[in-house]
Image: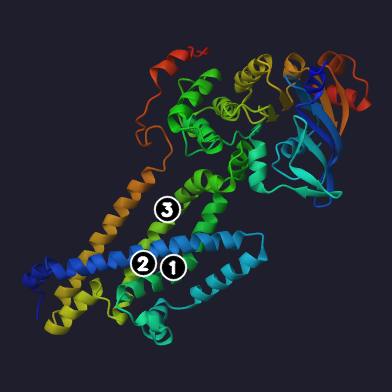
Amino acid sequence: MIFDPEIFLTQLVNPAYLWGALISVGVAACSLVIATVLGFFLAIGRTSKQGLLRAPAHLYVWFFRALPALLVLLIMWNALPQVFPALRSDWYTPFVAASVGLGLVEAAFMAEIIRSALSSVDDGQELAARALGMKPGSVMRKVVLPQAIRTALPPTGNEFIGLIKYSSLASVISLKELLTTAQVGVNITFRYAEYYTVAIMYYLVIVTIITLVQSRIEKRFLWTSRGAKKNTDPISLSTRALATVPKEK
Amino acid sequence: MSTETADTIPTLHVSNLHKAYNGIEVLKGVEFQINKGQVKAVLGPSGSGKSTMLRLMALLEPADRGEISLDGHRIGASDNNGRIAHHSERRLAVQRRDIGMVFQKFNLFPHLNALENVVLALTEVQNVNKAEARERAFLMLNKVGLGDRDRHFPSELSGGQQQRVAIARALVLNPHVMLFDEPTSALDPELVGEVLEVMEDLAAGGMTMIVVTHEVKFARRAADEVTLFDSGVIVEQAEPGEFFDNPQHDRTKQFLSHVH
């Protein structure tokens, strides 16, 4: 049995793979969103001055950093519905279980990324914003977060790629993601090389796209007049007329 | 003379101000006041507590003891049966709006261009709509001589230009008093002049200003009164002529012999 290009090419355009790839990306994206939101509050908790907030955040990170993602997925899909009958409903699909499960694990790691990103923002920034009279929420949203996001972006991109790969673990809870799709094909045809090569191709394309999108986003955080988004509303002519010619040079 | 009382209420008044960090007393009962339109320069060696006094006045840190009043109203804390009750951060935020602060390190927001730095103060703090905020911000940038730099980001501006944007950002909120914490100490010598020029224009325009500085020339030219701060207390206060040419205290003479 040698590598059959025809089988490879037929499978390469098989919609099942595309669907599997979309599910992989979908699970990774959903779990990243969950992890980022949860991780943000964990990061706030871990840096809080109040032990009452710090302790649960520490406990969470300690717990979910220790558990293998595979175990969490099995618990999410097999154990939890036994304990909570509400999870036996139709809406609790493998997709939901995988997204939440991986999101919970990932949150422990995102918490660290976000914590260090927040602490990388110069203290003077918060000080200046407070001195202007901005309220605490405003200071966070308009001054600290935009700067922390820039620092958090590259490691978050890495985490996203990691999650794409972690999503293949969800095959154990019968999620038809990319690797499962390949495996199903292999089980029927025993054409390992062709089917796995197709999977390789899809993973490469996915990660390439993520990398491109990431560098696009990072460019928006360059903070120079050239890299800036085009700000369309110019200062009105009447204001420019009011403004006298600058006196220097 | 019914206006007499209104005129004599100081714009900013601090009394018996105390502050300690880790048990080390930085402020030891400071008495200070400034009236509307006055410019006071505060000199003193590093670590004398002058910057700490400014931070406390700007309500950025709570005082251990003492009172701060703005236009006759106590701010920052209330008296709760003899115990000092510090106001919440949200309440302090509202009180800070009448006090402008300029920092040694400028602290411009690096993710916003010069105009947006000034706009943010208006939209977030005074709820001015975006269009109006942009017009007002532009006029303020123009006032500090940066009307042609509105699209530049802080990383694309010189230190002197950054500090002028920072002044515009504080000024656009129409504060009752402006506090300057060594505004030219982080600047290259050739950029000091443009910042001092803006500050002198402000002073001439009647702005109430407290300026912590090492610029003796500025203090002499622009200040109504010069204060020497040392070891957490005010040593001497006098008009510039008196202060520099005929200092009363030995500590002042000693300090001036170093900076002259």
Amino acid type indicated by mark 3: Leu
Amino acid type indicated by mark 2: Leu
Q: Residue furthest front?
A: B2
**The C terminus of chain B appears in which quarter of the rendering?**
top right
Q: Residue at x 49, y 74 (%)?
A: A64
**3 and 2 marks in contact (CB < 8 Å):** no
Amino acid type indicated by mark 1: Glu
**The N terminus of chain B appears in which quarter of the rendering?**
top right
- Left of B256 or right of it: where is B219? left
Q: Secondary structure at mark 1?
A: helix
Whole-angstrom CA distance, mark 2 to mark 1, is 8 Å
Whole-angstrom CA distance, mark 3 to mark 2, is 15 Å
The chain under label 3 reads A
Vertical arrangement, residue B90 with respect to residue B42, above or below: below
Q: Which mark is residue A153?
A: 3
Q: Which mark is residue A163?
A: 2
Q: Which mark is residue A106?
A: 1
The chain under label 1 reads A
Q: Earlier in the sequence, mark 2 or mark 1?
A: 1
Q: Position of residue B26 (x, y in %)?
A: 82, 42
**2 and 1 marks in contact (CB < 8 Å):** yes
- Left of B141 or right of it: where is A232? left
Whole-angstrom CA distance, mark 1 to mark 3, is 15 Å
Q: Quadrant of residue B168?
A: top right
Q: Quadrant of residue A73?
A: bottom left
